[in-house]
Amino acid sequence: MGMSKPRRLGAVAAATISVLMLAACGGSGGSGGAGSGATGGKVDGAGKTLNVLMNVTAQYPQEQQAWFKEMSTKFKAETGADIQWETFATANDEMTRIQTSVVSGQGPDVYGLGTTFTPTAYSTGAFVKLGDNEWNQLGGKDKFVPAALGISGPDEGNQIGIPFVSRPFVMAYNTELLAAAGIEKPATTWDEFTEQAKKLTKGDQYGVAVAYKDNFDPWKYIWGMSIQAGNPIIDGSKVRLDDPITKKAYDTYFGWVTKDKVVDPSSVGWANPQALAAFAAGKAAYFPMTSPLSIPALDASAVKGKYKYALMPTVPPGESSNPSGGKPAASILSGDNLVVADYSKQKDLAFAFIKMITEKDVQLNYFKVFGQLPANQAAAKELASNEIIAPALDSGAKSVATPFSGAWGDVQLSLTNVVVQSIPDLSAGSVSDANLTQRLKDEQAKSQTALDRAKK
Amino acid sequence: MASSVTEPRPSDSSPAAGAAAGPGGPTPSVTRRKGLSEKNRPLWLLIPGGFLMTIVILIPLAMGIWMSVIDLDQYSLRRWVSAEFIGIQNYIEAATSSDLLRSIWLSVSFAVISTLVTIPLGVAAAVVTQNAYRGRALVRSIFLIPYVLPSFVVASVWRTMLQPDGIVNVTLTNMGMDGGLWLNGPNAYWTLVWVEIWAAWPFIYLLALSGLQAVDHEVHEASALDGALWWNKLRYVIFPYLKGPVSLAFLLATLNHINNFTLPYVLFGAPAPSDVNVLPILVYVTSFQSFRFGLSAAMAVVSLILIAIPLFIYLRAVKLDVHDGGKK
């Protein structure tokens, strides 16, 4: 019996494990039933609570709480149901939430997702695919800005994301500095952009503010210049990171520091807010890869009233027009989508909620408070007359979705990693051809492995 | 654990026996002493602790090992129970086509260097604040500042100072030196070591101080009577007392360094520059940016084993796991 006590402990442990496993299995197996279908009229949600997980807006925490409250009241009046709000701070937080919810079969009914994260979420297969029925519940597909639907799913028949807001990228330029250099119009090709930047660089003033150290900005430049020249990076079952087109994009992007010297050498250590600060201080004439979210910061700075937005160049480096196969992409398709969890037992209520927050008035109000552009077509039209906003809306309409693949996360990581590993070279003044080629080769292999897994 | 030859008596665990063995009881009889021997210790008292350990440590460990042999990623996450069993393929991939071995080397070397530097600093600081003098409390409080600051804050502040145009480089330039790049490239490794040392030495200081406090007053008197001067006293009288606490500190600090995720993550971001792609960052990126949960579990298991081997040897060597009087 002296031996039996440890054994008993072992038995307790084993029993606990099996109970937990059973609970987990039961959870994941017992859900996923189809929705109860559209009711046509109003959804009755009396006594129910809808669980919504949204991205936290770090810039406007109080406004977000107020907006949550307002929407809860409105939703209660419309359906009788309450809303339980939750927020996440980073894509990683959210992935953890999705993981636990997917595995246990319970959690938020509605998720807000960044657009580039939507393919990853899609690949988990945990969200409701939108058929005619669902789109009708939402007020019809026509309600949304067409370009915003570009990253709702891999194709028209397999969409999961409902566009909520749009954050297209544009470049800000300093009207005074451009006028002083005799430049009438902001550049529309990357070559022209570099030439203008050279003219605009003198003393401690630089042509461009670029955030080389940012964790997200760099891949957007490279992807944009590549797609403009006809390389979508993920091309069917092939990754084309080691393509000469993409290498040229890196050469151009790095060349601003090493060859053209149109950016502050310190910018090899900058993240986006530092580049914004340099532009806001009047130290840089151009600030690409920003969005109307920078309006509050710029209006409180030295360049208030002296800046405008414009589309980033849409013609790739070394060309005067887009080559065949190249797309004049003004921006990645950027913003937030909403998705409904497959395990949700109140899908009708979830769609009623999404319908409500994508209505014109709610969207216009959301723009006013948070500076995020509407995905609702009527609301976007109404803002088109706003001079500052118009280029951003234009960019939204001309933005191109990043490839819809579960491997996109890895490709994005690879695109960024080439820049991260090149920073010592950038700081030293030149990125050798051999180094760049080797880095592209390494990352090509990693990305291709990831894409091969996605195809299985 | 206990392995018994004799048959224990069931009455030992009865309430009566438990009450009789309580403190303040009469001189225990032979039978009662037997009741507390190793053979019949009331092991069932371990159940609450054992239960917690099972939930907090053993189950996650078992699941981690299980995850490392299945093909778990974003595509199979939803049906994780039926994810394909792929044996040691994750391990092969981790060892051959990932940065795992390099990351382990970076992590271990970084941790050992940081610990080796912090130990003399911590011990010296403890010795300096051992004897009472005016302002000692203040000095002791100041010494603890790096330790009480959250890792996130420490990393953010250093990251700001070490920017290419940050205060460190500006100062160096004013002194006629070229600072260069601190947060990427070969210097980044030493930046990580430096900031870790800055943040972690008070831990050694605290443990060394507790060791010093344990030195009996008589020992000081005796060595003074023998005419030992400060260095001899320190070397032959005081340091032997510190062997235990400092060995423990060495162990815990090294493990803490290896496991530190916040510091490299906030200092360098993810993906990390290759010179500071330490183990926690590699596992994080594999898990949460590439979503290769199976592969990252294999990485974690490999590193656990690699770290456990020297740890085991070290534990045997310094005998931290053996207590005097532990056996009857």
Image (cartoon, rainbow, N blue to C red):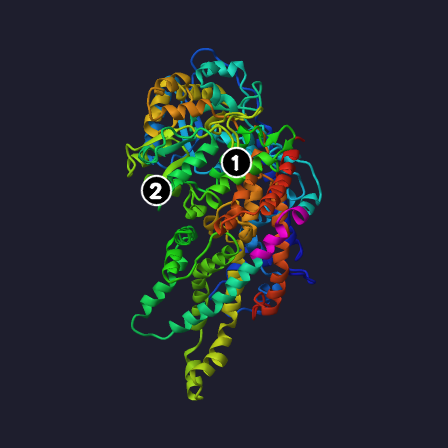
> In x, y percent, where is residue A170?
41, 30
- Residue B183 place in picture, x, y as percent: 47, 52
Q: Tag 2, which chain?
A: A
The answer to whether residue B102 is magenta is yes
In this picture, which residue range is highlighted in magenta? Answer: B94-107
Is disc 2 placed on a helix, strand or loop? loop
Residue annotated with mark 2:
A283
Amino acid under disc 1:
Ile
User: Label 1 lies in what chain?
Assistant: A
The C terminus of chain A sits in image quarter: top right
| Residue matched to label 1 | A222
Q: Earlier in the sequence, mark 1 or mark 2?
A: 1
Q: Nearer the viewer, residue B256 or A384?
A: A384
Which callout, 1 or 2, points to the residue nearer the camera? Answer: 2
Residue A299 is covered by the magenta coloring: no
Q: Nearer the viewer, residue B185 or B203?
A: B185
Q: Please name the amino acid that badge 2 sits on.
A: Lys
Same subunit: marks 1 and 2: yes
- Position of residue B133 relative to residue B298, above or below, is below
Q: Are marks 1 and 2 in contact (CB under 8 Å)?
A: no
Q: Looking at the picture, does residue B145 appear above or below residue A44?
A: below
Task: Indicate the position of residue A384 as horizontal and vertical percent values.
Answer: 36, 20
